[in-house]
Image (spheres, rainbow, N blue to C red):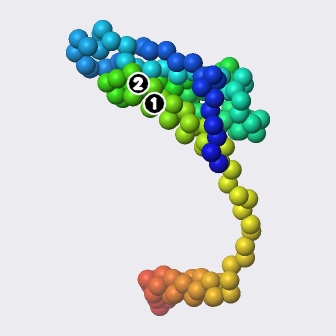
Amino acid sequence: MRIEIDPADFTWTAVRSQGAGGQNVNKVATAVRLRYDVGASSLPAAVKARLLASGDRRIAAGGVVVVKAQRHRTQERNLADAFARLRALVEAAAHVDPPRRATRPTLASKRRRAEDKRRRSQVKASRRTPDA
């Protein structure tokens, strides 16, 4: 199910990246922190509920999803990466597995299982010391 995320529903700020990078990492704010308020978003109610119940560590206590992207060297690519990860998170919450239908084992599978049990039993019985 394809869910559209309204650009007005999220805000982003540029922050300095962590880790190695020389002098450039101390000067340029290329990392992006994207904030998405699930409660105030335009998502369907069922998707909101599943997203908040998912237990993802990126969802803060107030129902705000915070995604930080710093993989790339440019702010634009990091923003696109953060948005893609937000979209993946929302689409995962929108996906609902079909209910499982209970099935019964076939007669042939029951016979194979019984035959395997008999064969295994004979293998183990042949390891025993004979009663003298």
Question: Badge 2 is on which residue?
Answer: 76
Question: How many C-alpha atoms fall within 10 Å of the one at disc 2: few (<14), some, or many (≥20)?
Answer: few
**Residue under the image location 64 percent in, 40 percent down:** 3
Kind of element beneath mark 2: helix
- Left or right of 4, for residue 67: left
In which image quadrant can residue 66 be found? top right
Q: In this view, does 1 lie above or below 21?
A: below
Question: How many C-alpha atoms fall within 10 Å of the one at disc 1: few (<14), some, or many (≥20)?
Answer: few
User: From this viewpoint, is residue 58 visible?
Assistant: yes
Residue 11: x and y in percent read 57, 18
Kind of element beneath mark 1: helix
Furthest residue to the right?
45
**Residue under the image location 45 percent in, 25 percent down:** 79
> Do the numbered discs 2 and 1 sit on residues whose CB atoms are within 8 Å?
yes
- Left or right of 74, for residue 97: right
Furthest residue to the left?
22
Residue 62: x and y in percent read 68, 19
- Left or right of 32, for residue 39: right
Residue 105: x and y in percent read 68, 78
Residue 4: x and y in percent read 63, 37
In which image quadrant can residue 126 be found? bottom left
**Viewer-side residue, 122 vs 109:** 109
Give how far apart the Cα atoms at labels 2 and 1 are. Answer: 6 Å
**Residue under the image location 60 percent in, 22 percent down:** 10
Q: Is residue 76 above or below residue 117?
A: above
Amino acid type indicated by mark 2? Glu
**Residue under the image location 63 percent in, 22 percent down:** 8
Amino acid type indicated by mark 1? Ala
**Viewer-side residue, 2 vs 101:** 2
User: From this viewpoint, is residue 64 visible?
Assistant: no
Question: Badge 1 is on which residue?
Answer: 80
Q: Residue 114 carries which label?
A: none
